[in-house]
Image (cartoon, rainbow, N blue to C red):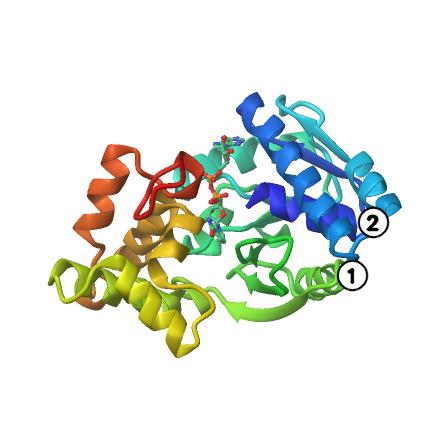
Amino acid sequence: MGQGIAQSVAMGGYPVILYDIIHANLDRAMEAIGGNLQKGVELGKVTADQKKEALERITPVDQLVGVAADLIIEAVVEDLQVKRELFSKLESLNTQDTIFASNTSSIPITQIASALESPHRFAGLHFFNPAYLMKLVEVIKGNKTEAGVVPILMEFVRSIGKTPVQATDAPGFIVNRVARHYYLESLRILEEQVADHQVIDELLEGYGFRMGPFKLMDLIGIDINYAVTTSIFDAFHYDPKFRPSRIQQNLVAAGHLGKKSGKGFYDYQ
Ligand SMILES: NC(=O)c1ccc[n+]([C@@H]2O[C@H](COP(=O)([O-])OP(=O)(O)OC[C@H]3O[C@@H](n4cnc5c(N)ncnc54)[C@H](O)[C@@H]3O)[C@@H](O)[C@H]2O)c1
């Protein structure tokens, strides 16, 4: 998600520092961004100059020192503790004017913000996958987010050619809460052996969904999709309708994380 967000923001004309703890992931991200933009050039949607300028605006870094900006958009793993520790460090490297945002799919914004000394400058900015193509962005106001921060973020999202929608800080916000049932009911159909994953995908695509649930889970990353369900299940006090699937739990344990690992429900090797 970080790479797609970086591409969108750079295409919007802003300089971007792309930080990842793993250097190889930065190389992969820059390669993917170059590839996406090249595809855009071939399709006539991006000029060669726009591609070159966007790539020049992105500075990949694997050290946190120097990660200072007007706006920080975090997209690390879906783990509250990891996010809180990162924001505490980032806060010490930035000024009183920096706005902090998380791309979390499910962790309450107010919970992440509680690690910050200035939770009033923190909000959710939830992009969808693939971030460089999908227009919708949920802007989430946490309990302590200052009223002025939300309009700034709404304007920022518009300035990169996307569509902001304000959502409240409820578990899964809006889209992911509804979408949970697309994944979970399909996983239950698979568990009950009513049909295999290819058939379920084909049927739902035939019905008009852009992507079948199993292809979509592979694109999202099985680990991330499973972590999001687990966090929503927890936030709704173990409401059985959000119960995570053991099929996903097993795939995560086996390291079959979807497209990014070469295998998930489908084989990509
Ligand atoms: N995958 C999706 O479809 C999707 C959609 C919307 C939102 N999100 C959210 O975006 C976030 C990231 O999801 P993803 O699918 O891109 O995950 P991912 O596992 O593909 O990528 C996470 C990246 O974060 C890096 N990272 C981990 N810990 C770090 C740290 N402490 N400091 C710096 N970098 C660190 C990893 O090296 C990795 O490159 C999650 O919060 C997820 O809920 C994901």
Along the viewing direction, whichever of 59 and 80 lies nearer the viewer: 59
- The answer to whether any part of residue 236 appears in the image is no
Residue in the picture at 20% in, 54% down: 245
Quarter the C terminus occupies: top left
Crowd tier of the residue under label 2, counting other residues whose Cα lies within 10 Å: few below 14, some 14–19, many 20 or above: some
Instruction: Tell me which corner region of the image, top left, top right, bottom left or bottom right, holds residue 117.
Output: top right
What percent of the width, then of the height, locates residue 78?
A: 41, 44
Tell me the residue at 43%/64% (across/down): 211
Asked whether, in this view, residue 194 is left or right of residue 139, the answer is: left
Three-letter residue code for mark 2: Gly
Up/down of 172 relative to 49, above or below: below
- Name the residue at the left extreme: 192
Q: CA distance from mark 1 to mark 2?
A: 9 Å
At horizontal 40% and vertical 62% (from top left) the residue drawn is 172
Residues packed near mark 1 inside 10 Å, few (<14), some (14 to 19) or many (20 plus): some
Would you place residue 1 above or below residue 159 in this image? above
- In the rendered view, tell whether residue 65 sits above or below residue 152: above
Q: Which residue is mark 1?
A: 159
Residue type, numbered disc 1: Ser
- If you read the primary sequence from the N terminus, does the residue marked by circle 1 or circle 2 appear first? 2
Give x and y (percent) for residue 189: 18, 65
Q: Are marks 1 and 2 in contact (CB under 8 Å)?
A: yes
Apparent side of residue 250 relative to residue 111 in the rendered image (left or right) = left
User: In this view of the protein, which residue sits in the foreground, 137 or 154?
Assistant: 137
Residue 65 visible somewhere in the drawing: yes
Residue situated in front as seen by the camera: 28 or 80: 28
Q: Is mark 1 within 8 Å of ligand 1?
A: no
Q: Secondary structure at mark 2?
A: loop
* Residue highlighted by disc 2: 13
- Residue 125 at what x, y percent from top left? 59, 56
